[in-house]
Amino acid sequence: MQAPEGTKDYLPDEAGYWEQFKRIAADIFGRCGYVTIDTPLFEQTELFVRGIGEATDVVAKEMFQAISGENLKRLVAGEAIKSKSHLSLRPEGTAGVVRAVVQHDLVPQGAPPVKLMYAGPMFRAERPQKGRLRQFNQIGVECLGADAPSVDAEAIIMLMRFFEALGIPAAVTRLLMNSMGCDDCRPAYREQVRAYILGHASELCEECTRRAQTNPLRAFDCKNPACVAVMAEAPLISDHLCDACKGHHEQVESYLDAAGVPFVRAPRLVRGLDYYTRTVFEVQVTEGMGSQNAIGGGGRYDKLAEELGGRPTPGLGFALGFERCVLALQAAGFSFPAAQSLDLFLACVDASVRKEAFHLLQACRDSGLVADMDHQGRSLKSQFKLADKLDAPMVLILGPEEMDKGLVKLRHMGTHAEAAIALDGLYAVLGGLEYENSETLIESLLAKIFG
Ligand code: AMP
């Protein structure tokens, strides 16, 4: 059996790095006041239809439906099921978070903005390719309740700081910025794009001409070379923003300038989801990524809470993709740190000392050391090989002759120095170790024993 198409197993080294990745994000985003929220992996389909937009690719083509066995039987039998039973695996995180904010009234009238972050899997039934999976991990943030341009700038700066902290070289990242306008200026602009597309229908692909009816701005995203050439001459939103949107965008840009965060104006950046208003942005990696080169992106969505039945609550968020960040890091020479490394390995000269070794092992672990022993009856030589493989800086050797004298040997794997130490004394040292982290623990243990 194989993992389903477009999914993958996160083996221990990568799974361990995902934990570390989340810690780095929680540290950087936490400093900006973001706290964690967890919402369900599936929601009512209606949420995504209303939130993300019926005509978007994500909703129209890419959602995995989730259905109970009972309801599936009903559907197969041609019976109706309740609309609330139409469920979909979440294709993105914003709709669920905003639903939760509205449901739990997390931004009461007059309250300060709420800053939320999430991490976890998203599901899209896309055609799998390098950097494009059907189940992938995102970390995202959402700030609801404030419409100031400083919120947009703060989130973008935070995102760029995160990529820097991960080790993705700044020289290969590119921040694209645009404004999608608002309900005042976008409708007229959208009509202009629609008219432009219909005027060039014979030069465009079928999908783009169809989009003219439902979602004309998406034609900017089409990869077909003929469409790209036609859309290069299409009217630009930057020439049609109202004064308020123009002012907002200029302020976001000036905050970024002041923070020394470089960006590129991208007047054709529309992004795939319907809910964006004003600021949209995307971070791309310019080397080693192939066509799936966006590692993160987001924007402002000032109408979404209302769309989902809440009071008017401006919002802004972004999401970044774990797997694509890993590809970007790997292109720059990164490999996963080993998931497991030991502080201490306990080796047994023969089976007669195993019971004592097992007892000592628990005392080592209780003192805070990452410790293990052989469980397969290996020879002493092969126990040492295992200790080496697990990167253990120390090996405790228990042999029947030493044990008779109440002694064990400690071997420093780096220098090969060995010391015979009293078992009683060792238990006392382990019991009295000051635990800060395992690195200082090993040092203090080595210092105590080797001086
Ligand atoms: P989006 O929600 O489409 O704005 O995506 C935000 C980020 O999630 C992207 O910049 C990617 O890094 C990542 N991402 C989106 N779709 C996929 C996918 N199918 N496979 C892997 N990563 C993805």
Image (cartoon, rainbow, N blue to C red):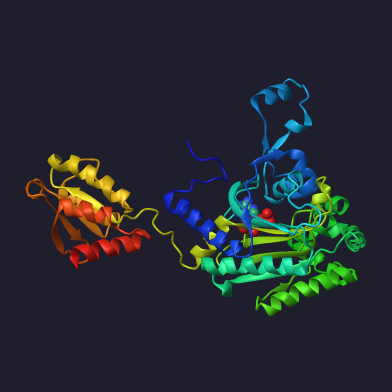
Q: Residue 286, can we see it?
A: no
In this orientation, which residue lies closer to the viewer: 428 or 258?
428
Pick out the residue farthest to the top.
Answer: 77
Q: Is residue 295 left or right of residue 423?
A: right
Q: Quadrant of the C terminus?
A: bottom left
Q: Residue at x 44, y 59 (%)?
A: 336
Q: Residue at x 19, y 62 (%)?
A: 449
Place of residue 236 in the rendered image (x, y in percent of width and height, measured from the top left): 84, 68
Q: Can you tell which quarter of the image residue 68 is in?
A: top right
Q: Is residue 201 left or right of residue 61?
A: right
The x and y percentages for residue 289 are 57, 63
Point out residue 262 in the picture as x, y percentages from the top left corner.
66, 76
- How many dots with numbers? 0
* Image point (90%, 69%), residue name: 242
Left or right of residue 409, residue 44 in this image = right
State left or right for residue 372 relative to residue 12. left
Camera-side residue of 265 and 302? 302
Work out whether 334 lies above or below 256: above
Give the answer, above or below, for where 225 lies relative to 77: below
Q: What residue is drawn where x is 40% and y is 54%?
A: 339
In which quarter of the view is residue 238 placed? bottom right
Kindly tell me whether residue 439 is visible in this rendering: yes
Q: Nearer the viewer, residue 22 or 366?
A: 366
Residue 20 point in image, percent of width and height: 49, 57
The answer to whether 135 is drawn above or below residue 224 in the figure is above
Question: In what quadrant does ligand 1 lie?
Answer: bottom right
